[in-house]
Image: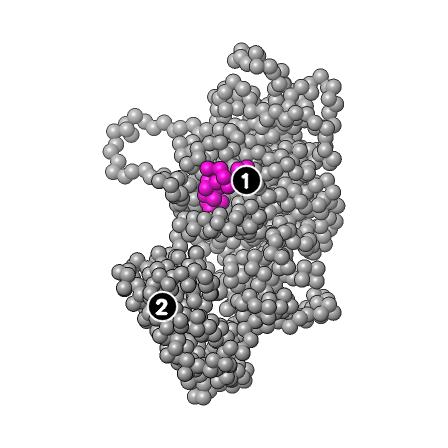
Amino acid sequence: MPMIMEDGINVDDLFGESTSLELDLTPTPSKRGLPQRLDEMRLLGCCQKIAWSKQGCIAYVTQDASRVNLRHLECRPTDGKWVLSDDTQLLPVTEVHGGHPLVHLCWNELGSELAVVDSSGRVSIYNISFALNTLSGQRQGAFDPDDDGAQIVGMMWLNVHRSVQAFSQANKRQGRWNYSSFRRRPIGPFHPAGKAGLICITRSGVIRFLYQNPDLRWTEISAELKNTSYSDRLLTHAALVATPGGILVVTHSACQKICFYRLQINWTPPQWDQSQMKQGSNQFPVPSFRFMHSKVEVPYDIPMSRAPAQNSEHLTPPPNPLYRLTHLDAILATQETATNPWVVAVFSISPRVSPDHPQQQGPPSIIVRWQLESTPQVLHPKFDEVVSKKSNVQIKTEYGNVVAVVYDDSSISFYDANTMTVCHGFGDAETVTCLAQAGFHYPAYATGLSISFSPSGCNAVMLDSEGQVQLRCMEHAYGAESGLFDQTIASLTMAFCRAVGSDMNSDDILVILRQQLSADAQSMFIHGAYRALPVNCEFTLEGDKLLSNHALKERKENRLTLHPEAIRMVLGNTKWLLDFLQYTLNEFLELANEFESIPSDAETVSQKLKTIRSLPLMVILSGLPRSLLRFIGRALRGIYASYSTLPLIGDSRVYYAEICQIIDSLPVRLDVYDKFLSEAEAAAKKSYMLVGIQNPDRSGAEKELLLNARIPQSLIHAVTVLFQHSIPALRPEIDCMAIYLSDYSWLGLGTDPRAEMYRRTRDVDIVKKLPLRPVGRDERQEGKHNGHGQMRRRCVRCCGMLCGPYPSRTHVSFRMMYKTGLLRYCLCGAAWMVESETNR
């Protein structure tokens, strides 16, 4: 369908009102580097020097425009504070681009692919493979032509074909916040094989499509955009956005004309089966362009500022030639009744213009917005007589609804994308849609020339005039005494749920939580997140049901055919688990001594439990970890019993022998552990039965254990049985002295001086559960430079360590790491970073 502009709209009547959207910026002395930055934005649409990916990696171009450095948020192991990491240079960039100045950075939707663009339009692509500060090259830009006409003025990554859990808003009803969630469907086009694709618009009016084949090789197709004259082919800016009707392309030429294109990408074949790769087929999907519509707007004129008395439909202010386009963007509307996209343009006057210039009377910058409309196709009246039995159901799609405006003094304001009204905390206190509406704002800060926001928008990084990265964090405008404080918790909860539902990094939200919220407020946040997310707290699975799980049984039956490398990875976890069971029994023996002289009435036991903070007690009373411990214990008993009859050879026999040796040296037999866990299961079941709680109703008690670390009243009877009956009966079968004298400092659970000393001086592999020996300076340098050392990766959130070569020496270990999701993410869900000598 053809697209038309709004009837009678001009740049002075932006939203159907008599006044233009002029962000009145009081003219101030130009900041250092600001004139050069505005000139750069005026000449080239793609000049983003810093970009924050949804995975948490921050990439920025150095001041000399020759290198790209990487940074990220991390929890500092020494004091637990969240800070920006040290710089890590993306080494291949300088060589790949041959010394050409780097001008633009762009992450894909998932935040795992980074496109680096230089001044000649050459594009190189890098991927986050296993750590935030280590990117691997996917496409080399050295093979692109070195041509000024190939400069990139606009680009867009293809969306990923996946639906995510989205949250539109939070509403307060009867004193409780409810979070509206739905499945958000992506907008095409998509790559049939699920690979990456990048669309670029060049200065000479050529559209390039870079896409990755299933064999991981990159290919390219191109086509020329239709233009009305030769002068229109010199483009300065371009904006692209995916819409349900195709890709909308908006271009701006040097002669100040704006052109609109509707583009579709068709694939041949449209579907791709991954099994074709296994069959050796090299017939990959091939794309082609289809231009559905194009429209050219006549040259526009930015009007000069006029007084309020001049607001008349019959008066047209004279144009102001000092304004030049510095930013062009296309966004999608949020209203269900108005799904047509908006085109937003920012026009600015260069600070180089003399203040005494006769036309220097308006604000330094003006935002202009157009809405694109489609002309409806009118059918013949006879079609109205046709009765249809089908209803037309339109899929509702969620779009971004906040526009951030950064001023030259680095102050930041947020506007609603539909009405361009300022978002602040003085609106409806019963509804929350974003952090800015709940009272969060960016405080005054030093000036910067480039900015990028975190995945959730609550943090930002700026490049100052010296090329240094500065971190900015949102702050709340109201204190805890205000009645709007719960609105603050609701906004953070919704931001966190959006990040989790979209597989985005949420460390930026944790920075706000740790720095600005009290312990009680953090507890409110956790409760809200568990209520908003589809988290099932019913962790009271019956032990027999868990042990009869088909997937677990299959792994139990295949345990004896594990590869030696896989057994080696399991060896450390076996040692850790058995030490944890000893640690648990030791804790229960000490608590049983305390409860020995306490009356068994519920009130006395409840008061005593309020003074106890015991992790082993919480684990044993909780259903799922207790059942998992029973399952693992039975698997180890099976390995031990069948070891002598297995035809093991080589390393497999060595590693199996080590596992059996660990079991032999236990101060408690495995069957005693199983007996202890079985009695805990029976005590918990009887405790629920005494208070009238059936299996479907146990989630409340399990949630109390998980979120508050408090033992509910429904489990008081189970505690009494364990400490006053079960543990005393098991004492004759336990070597209490051996358990008491064992060293549990390496488990990372205790708070005694010995555990604290181990935590400060030693590291334990969080995946393999193997203590890591301290690495000296010479070994660090040797491992870093010649590749013979073990790569050490640290979790940016929990500071857990992972040590080992990458890629893994064997296919089996690599496959295990890939299936468990530990190649790129830690057990806590955060990303890895590679440690160097400077950040140890």
The quadrant of the picture occupied by the C terminus is bottom right
Q: Quadrant of residue 742?
A: bottom right
Q: Nearer the viewer, residue 1 or 673?
A: 673
Q: Nearer the viewer, mark 1 or mark 2?
A: 2
Q: Quadrant of residue 127?
A: bottom right
Whether 362 is drawn above or below 734: the answer is above
First in sequence, mark 1 or 2: give its number: 1
- The spot of residue 818 in percent (x, y) is 51, 64
For image coordinates 48% across by 27% down, the residue present is: 4
Q: Which mark is residue 811?
A: none
Number of numbered discs present? 2
Whether 820 is drawn above or below 356: the answer is below
For image coordinates 64% across by 49% down, the residue present is: 59
Q: Is residue 600 visible?
A: yes
Residue range in magenta is: 476-498
How far apart, in angstroms, are the residues tagged by discs 1 and 2? 49 Å
Q: Is residue 113 left or right of residue 380?
A: right
Q: Any magenta on residue 255? A: no
Q: Nearer the viewer, residue 616 or 160?
A: 616
Q: Which mark is residue 599?
A: 2
Do the residues under discs 1 and 2 have CB atoms within 8 angstroms?
no
What residue did someone put label 1 on?
Answer: 476
Within 10 Å of disc 1 (Cα), the crowding (few <14, some 14-19, many 20+) is many
- The spot of residue 353 in percent (x, y) is 73, 25
Whether 456 is drawn above or below 39: the answer is below
Within 10 Å of disc 2 (Cα), the crowding (few <14, some 14-19, many 20+) is few
Instruction: Considering the whole magenta stretch, tell me its main secondary structure.
Output: helix
Q: Quadrant of residue 746?
A: bottom right
Q: Any magenta on residue 490? A: yes
Q: Is residue 808 left or right of residue 645?
A: right
For image coordinates 64% across by 21% down, the residue present is: 362
